[in-house]
Image (cartoon, grey):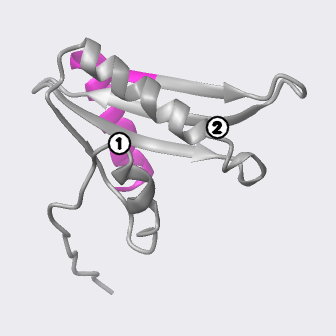
């Protein structure tokens, strides 16, 4: 999905569903060090759209706290189906997502046009 497609997707969800942004800030430096974007689509599917924590702040449970907030919000909205997409080459993230009950159900292969 390119940036234009992502923008259109988020705009559609923002107008017909829900888009949520959770931020993590270092209280000492007062700078943002992580975020999680999640959404609930009109068909009531929750999705972790994007999550990132600055490398120096990883392994301090910041990512876990961010995703937990997003999932708790989905639960409060009555979402029953949740998903997250993991890009090719980032399979090590599967271990992180398994802690929250996410498991691979299908791998989609896309043909690249030259």
The residue positioned 38% from the left and 31% from the top of the image is 38
Do residues under tags 2 and 1 come within 8 Å of each other at their CB atoms?
no
Task: Please state if 59 lies on the left or on the right of 21 as rendered.
Answer: right
Whole-percent x, y for residue 18 in the image: 30, 19
* As drawn, 22 above or below 105: above
- Dot 1, crowdedness within 10 Å: few (<14), some or many (≥20)? few
* As drawn, 43 above or below 3: above
Say which element carries label 1: loop
- Dot 2, crowdedness within 10 Å: few (<14), some or many (≥20)? many
Residue 100: give its label.
1
Whole-percent x, y for residue 37 in the image: 45, 33
Q: Which is more toward the observer, 8 or 81? A: 81
Whole-percent x, y for residue 32 in the image: 73, 31
Magenta stretch bounds: 1-20
Image quarter in which the N terminus is found? bottom left
Image quarter in which the C terminus is found? bottom left
Instruction: Residue 95: name its quadrant.
Output: bottom left
The residue positioned 44% from the left and 30% from the top of the image is 68
User: Which of the two discs, 2 and 1, sits closer to the camera?
Assistant: 1
The residue indicated by pointer 2 is 34
* As drawn, 67 above or below 103: above
Q: Which is more toward the observer, 13 or 53? A: 53
Task: Please state if 49 lies on the left or on the right of 35 as rendered.
Answer: left
Say which element carries label 2: strand
**Label 2, label 1: how far apart the Cα atoms are:** 18 Å
């Amino acid at each position: 999905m390119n940036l234009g497609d992502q923008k259109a997707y988020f705009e559609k969800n923002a107008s017909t569903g829900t888009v949520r942004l959770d931020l993590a800030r270092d209280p000492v430096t007062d700078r943002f060090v992580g975020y999680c974007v999640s959404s609930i689509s009109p068909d009531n599917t929750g999705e972790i759209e994007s999550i990132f924590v600055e490398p120096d702040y990883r392994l301090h449970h910041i990512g876990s706290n961010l995703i937990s907030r997003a999932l708790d919000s989905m639960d409060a909205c009555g979402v029953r189906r949740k998903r997250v997409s993991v890009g090719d080459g980032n399979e090590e993230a599967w271990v992180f997502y398994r802690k929250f009950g996410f498991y691979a159900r299908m791998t989609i292969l896309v043909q690249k046009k030259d």
